[in-house]
Amino acid sequence: MSHKFLSKRLDLVNESATIAMAQAAREIASQGHDVISLSLGQPDFDTPDHVKQAAKDALDNGYTNYTPVPGLPEFVDAIIAKFKRDNNLEFTKENIVVSCGAKQSISNLMNALVDPGDEVIIFTPYWVSYFDIVTMVGGVPVCVKAGIESDFKVTPEQLEAAITDKSKVIIFSSPCNPTGSVYSEDELHALAKVIDEKQDLFVISDEIYEYINFGDKHTSIGSFDIMKDQVATVNGMAKGFAMTGWRIGYMGAPAWLAKACSAIQSQVTSGAAAFSQKASAVALSSDMSPTLEMKKAFLRRKQIMIDGLQAIDGIKTNDPQGAFYIFPDVSAFFGKTNGTVTINNSADFAIELLKNAHVATVAGSAFGDNDCIRLSYAAADNQLHEALRRMKAFLSEFK
């Protein structure tokens, strides 16, 4: 990307691979093909009716003006109560900042914490935007990679080996996008003990998929006493409440950091939309049964995906315990051909699958692991069955 008027910063930024694949899928669909999209990370459910009603009521009651940068007081109160109820995290209003999506919370934090040359340890596979946000603020990404054999989870020994005198921040998600892996309480505590020995390290814990957890109760790394001054816990409304378009994220962090993030946000977007915050306060504080029903549907769909993928020769998969993704290892197909095309990497795999089987996925290289692809099972059961049938038929041609 070059033009005489563009900043050099643009050379560091890649378009989001998930958005690029969605665009490619739309183009093929526009040619008359029936494309099944397993590429985008959003629930295929509608926002619960009582949450939509809360937004309508807010509009009728005049919530159409600017909001305080850190958030509407009633939403901040709901976030504080939620953190205490669900995460064993004790916060006051000085610790909370509401943003226009969890991605903005992460961007605020990186801008507040990272100077040029600081190293940011990224547990890999990672969500696509971590890497680019780090490079945009001048940080140096240090990718610590865990493969399918370890359920894509970084060990304390790996973390310790990655820490240098330039390490400043650690970022990871649990449940994880793209792998669906969930760190247990014991695994997080073991990581926390490593971090506790390095008082100069700060953790950004991305917990946006918290409510889509099929195993044990969700654990926040910030809930350990040794961690409470070294963690910012990021969450949002998109995934657990099917509110992707409402653009509401939030974080709980030490007061000094929340104040810094609020100052940064005040010069970028200011406060998030008033009616979205009013609706979000209701979502966090009321009936969770729509969220639990979504989780049940995702669990059923996960099994459809695992069964179908395991029936395809050459694909390896684990059993992810959260989110709505599966991240199979497809490297057995690299170097193979069907006589027309040869698959050399995850990008080839994803694009040929889209062009020939009309199934949209995302190359694992976008998430820091070229051996895999990401499949989102936020789609109807019949679409998943058909996508798996097409994949099996297409991949059977490769020798």
Image (cartoon, rainbow, N blue to C red):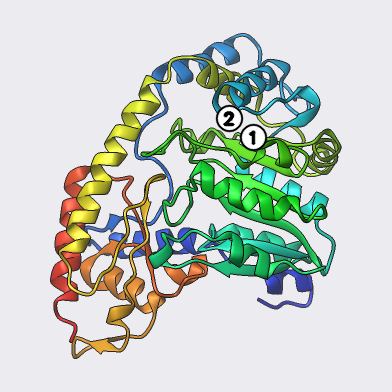
The answer to whether marks 1 and 2 mark residues whose Cβ atoms lie closer than 8 Å is yes
Residue 194 occupies quadrant: bottom right
Q: Is residue 354 above or below residue 189?
A: below
Disc on res. 87: 2
- Distance between the alpha carbons at the discs numbered 1 and 2: 7 Å
Place residue 330 in its image quadrant: bottom left
Above or below, 298 relative to 190: above
Residue 195 vs residue 267: left or right?
left
Disc 2 residue type (three-letter): Asn
- Whether residue 117 is visible: yes
Q: Quadrant of the C terminus?
A: bottom left
Give the residue at x 59% y 53%: 172
Look at mark 1 in the image and give the residue it sits on: 223
48 vs 383, left or right, is right
Quarter of the view holding residue 251: top right
Residue 32 horizontal/vertical position (percent): 23, 61
Residue at (60% x, 18% y) in the render? 278
